[in-house]
C-alpha cells in the first residue's frame, strides 16, 4: 500500500502558507500541492482498503498516518461510501472473489487556488491483488481514474475537503460508490438493440470457436491489455466527448481482424475510423450494438458467464433502454469467470463478478464476436 505524491515536503497535512517560491497566479505552490495529494490519497486509500480481506493487525491508514479533514456533510457521505464498499466486499465474497491487498497512488494534475477555495484535479492508480480462491484468478486487477476535489480554508487552518467527484464516464471503479446516471430520452425509433443476458452463475456451456473464424482473439486481448492505461497515440481519445470505452473496444476488434464497413459516418450499419473522422458506431455505445447485430459481426449470448476472450460486454446502468458502456473480455478463468479490460474508467482485468456486485440491477448485453 502506498500513496505517490507530487512534491512531498512533510508527513503531516500543512496549513495554508503560500511561502516558498511565488506561485503563478491562481496555481498552488509545491507545499500546497503536496497537501492536496495527501488529502486525496487518504480518502482514496481508505476506499480501497474497505474492499481488502480483513486480517489481524493490518494497517489501513495512509503511509503518513494523517487524516484528511472533511466538511461535516462530506464526512457523512464518505462514511456512507465506506459502508457501501464493505457491503460490496460482502457481495464479492458471496460471488467467490476477494482481495488480499490494495496499492493506491495519487498524483495531482492541476491545483487552482482562489482566495480560500481550491479546485484540484487528481489521478488515482490502484492495483488490487486477487485472493487465490479457485486458483486461476489473475494476479491483479488495476484501474486509473480521475477526480475533481473542492477544498476550503478558513482562518488560516488546514485545508478541508468539501467534495470529491469522478471525472470519468464509465462504470465506477471498484473502490468508488455507485451514483445515479442521467436518464436518456427514447427517440421512439426501432433499432436492433439485442437481447439482455442473464447474470446467473454458473452458465450453460457455450464454447467459443477460436480458429477458422478469421479473427485473432488473442490479438484483441493483447491489444486491450497493452493500451488500457497508456493510450495508443495512433487513435484520437474521446474521454471528453462521452467516453472512450467503445472507441477502445473498436480498436481492439480491428487489431484482431475486424474489417471496415464503409459508408457515411451517421449510418449505424457502417463502421470505420481514419485520421480525421470515424463512424458513430466506432465510438457510440448504442450505435456499436446496432452495427454489430445488423451486420452479424456478433450474436447475443444468453448468459454473461458464457463470454470468452475477445467477446464484448455492454451495460445499461439504469435500465432506461440506452446502453452506457462497452468493454472486452481479455482473460477467462478455467472455472468460467470472464475478466474485462476497458477505458473510462481505465481498467485492467476486472472480474465480471465485481461488475455485478457493483451494479446488481443493471441490464447486461453479452456479444459473441
Image (spheres, grey):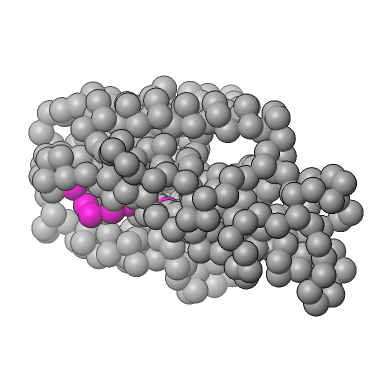
Q: Which residues are magenta?
A: 137-144
Q: Position of residue 323 (x, y in %)?
A: 48, 35
**Nearer to me, 84 or 227:** 84
Name the residue located 49 percent from the left edge and 32 percent from the top edge: 82
Q: Quadrant of residue 123?
A: bottom right
Name the residue located 47 percent from the left edge and 46 percent from the top edge: 61
Residue 232 relative to residue 156: left or right? left
Name the residue located 67 percent from the left edge and 42 percent from the top edge: 69
Residue 310 relative to residue 37: left or right? left
The secondary structure making up most of the magenta span is strand
Q: Position of residue 234 (x, y in %)?
A: 48, 74
Vertical position of residue 120 compared to residue 58: above or below? below
Residue 216 visible in image:
yes
Name the residue located 84 percent from the left edge and 51 percent from the top edge: 156
Residue 126 relative to residue 93: left or right? right
Q: Position of residue 304 (x, y in %)?
A: 26, 34
**Could you tell me which quadrant the N terminus lies in?**
bottom left
Vertical position of residue 206 compared to residue 282: above or below? above
Q: Quadrant of residue 79?
A: top right
**Nearer to me, 69 or 241:** 69
Vertical position of residue 361 compared to residue 223: above or below? above
Total marks shown come to 0
Q: Position of residue 290 (x, y in %)?
A: 43, 40
Vertical position of residue 177 compared to residue 137: above or below? above
Residue 247 visible in image:
no
* 286 inside magenta stretch: no
Residue 1 relative to residue 275: left or right? left
Amino acid at each position: 500500500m502506498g500513496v505517490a505524491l507530487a512534491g512531498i515536503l512533510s508527513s503531516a497535512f500543512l496549513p495554508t502558507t503560500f511561502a516558498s517560491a511565488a506561485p503563478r497566479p491562481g496555481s498552488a505552490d509545491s507545499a500546497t500541492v503536496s497537501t492536496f495529494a495527501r488529502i486525496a490519497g487518504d480518502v482514496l486509500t481508505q476506499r480501497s482498503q474497505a474492499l481488502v480481506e480483513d486480517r489481524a493487525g493490518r494497517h489501513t491508514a495512509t503511509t503518513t498516518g494523517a487524516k484528511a479533514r472533511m466538511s461535516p456533510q462530506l464526512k457523512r457521505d464518505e462514511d456512507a461510501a465506506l459502508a457501501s464498499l464493505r457491503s460490496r466486499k460482502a457481495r464479492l465474497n458471496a460471488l467467490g472473489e476477494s482481495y488480499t491487498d490494495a496499492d493506491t497512488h495519487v498524483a495531482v494534475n492541476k491545483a487552482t487556488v482562489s482566495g480560500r477555495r481550491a479546485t484540484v484535479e487528481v489521478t488515482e492508480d490502484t492495483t488490487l491483488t486477487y485472493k487465490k480462491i479457485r486458483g486461476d484468478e489473475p494476479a491483479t486487477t488495476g484501474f486509473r481514474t480521475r477526480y475533481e476535489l473542492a477544498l476550503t480554508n478558513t482562518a488560516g487552518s488546514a485545508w478541508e475537503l468539501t467534495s470529491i467527484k469522478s471525472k470519468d464516464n464509465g462504470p465506477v471503479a471498484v473502490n468508488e460508490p455507485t451514483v445515479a446516471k442521467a436518464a436518456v430520452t427514447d427517440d421512439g425509433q426501432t433499432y436492433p438493440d439485442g437481447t439482455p443476458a442473464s447474470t446467473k452463475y454458473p452458465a450453460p456451456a457455450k464454447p467459443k470457436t477460436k480458429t477458422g473464424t478469421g479473427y485473432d482473439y488473442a490479438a484483441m486481448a493483447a491489444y486491450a491489455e497493452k493500451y488500457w492505461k497508456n493510450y495508443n497515440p495512433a487513435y484520437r481519445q474521446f474521454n471528453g466527448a462521452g467516453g472512450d470505452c467503445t472507441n477502445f473496444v473498436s480498436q481492439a476488434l480491428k487489431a484482431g481482424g475486424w474489417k471496415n464497413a464503409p459508408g457515411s459516418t451517421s449510418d449505424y450499419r457502417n463502421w470505420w475510423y481514419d485520421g480525421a473522422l470515424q463512424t458513430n458506431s466506432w465510438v457510440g455505445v448504442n450505435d456499436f450494438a446496432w452495427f454489430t447485430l445488423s451486420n452479424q459481426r456478433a450474436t447475443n449470448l444468453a448468459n454473461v458467464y458464457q463470454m470468452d476472450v475477445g467477446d464484448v460486454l455492454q451495460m445499461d446502468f439504469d435500465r432506461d433502454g440506452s446502453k452506457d458502456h462497452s468493454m472486452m473480455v481479455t482473460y477467462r478463468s478455467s472455472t468460467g469467470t470472464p475478466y474485462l479490460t476497458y477505458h473510462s474508467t481505465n481498467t485492467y482485468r476486472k472480474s465480471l463478478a465485481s461488475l455485478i456486485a457493483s451494479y446488481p440491477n443493471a441490464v447486461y448485453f453479452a456479444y459473441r464476436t
